Amino acid sequence: MRCRIFFILLLVSVSGCTGSLKGDVYSRGDARKIQQVKLGEVVAIREVAIEGRRSAVGELGGAVIGGIAGGSVGKGRGKSIMTTIGVIVGGIIGSNIEEAATSANGIELTIKLDNGNAIVVVQEKGQEEFRVGAKVKIVSVNGNSRVSLL
């Protein structure tokens, strides 16, 4: 029962840490700031994978759960060995779960700007359906850019 509770808490904490990379999501820090806008046309689109994050949250959560699970097996020295193995394996599994939970499907948009330059922006797939030839705006603030249809 304790193992289930820790696993649920791990999943909640990992999912709570995920930030969106979609074009229509802004961080609190970006709100009410002047942002630079460029206009252009989509010349190429490619689906990409945005890798997930690996942090101490997933690894430590998995290690705790693995240690508890391993500690419930055996007695004496065998119990200590199983606890150690549980911690190690749990940490690896927890890290992999976090990476999978925070990965996303993305799109790479190649855009010819109105000034003639070309840029590429990668963002998480959202509701907007981009197509080659579509007019777009690129909004940039604090080194982050997002693309949306005009």
Image (spheres, rainbow, N blue to C red):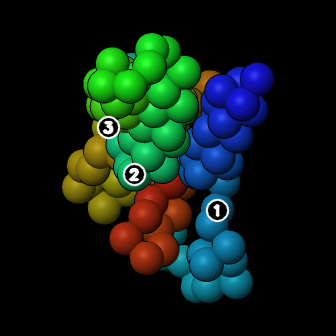
Would you name the residue on which mark 2 appears? 56
- Residue 32 drawn at (x, y percent): 70, 84
Would you name the residue on which mark 3 appears? 110
**Pointer 2 or 1: first along the chain:** 1
Q: Amino acid at mark 3?
A: Thr
**Pointer 1 or 3: first along the chain:** 1
- Residue 114 drawn at (x, y percent): 37, 56
Q: CA distance from mark 2 to mark 1?
A: 25 Å
Q: Residue at x 34, y 30 (%)?
A: 80
48 or 139, which lies in front?
Answer: 48
Q: Quadrant of residue 68?
A: top right
Where is the N terminus found, in terms of image quarters?
Answer: top right
Mark 2 lies on a secondary structure that is helix
- Residue 123 drawn at (x, y percent): 46, 41
Disc 2 crowd, CA 10 A, few/some/many (<14, 14-19, 20+): few
Q: Quadrant of residue 109?
A: top left
Label disc, if present, on residue 26 of the rendered structure = 1
Q: Residue at x 43, y 64 (%)?
A: 144
Q: Is residue 35 above or below residue 72?
A: below
Please identify, in this view, whether the residue under mark 1 or under mark 3 is nearer the observer.
Answer: 1
Which residue of the protein is positioned furthest toward the left in this rendering? 117
Q: Residue at x 48, y 27 (%)?
A: 71
Q: CA distance from mark 3 to mark 2?
A: 35 Å
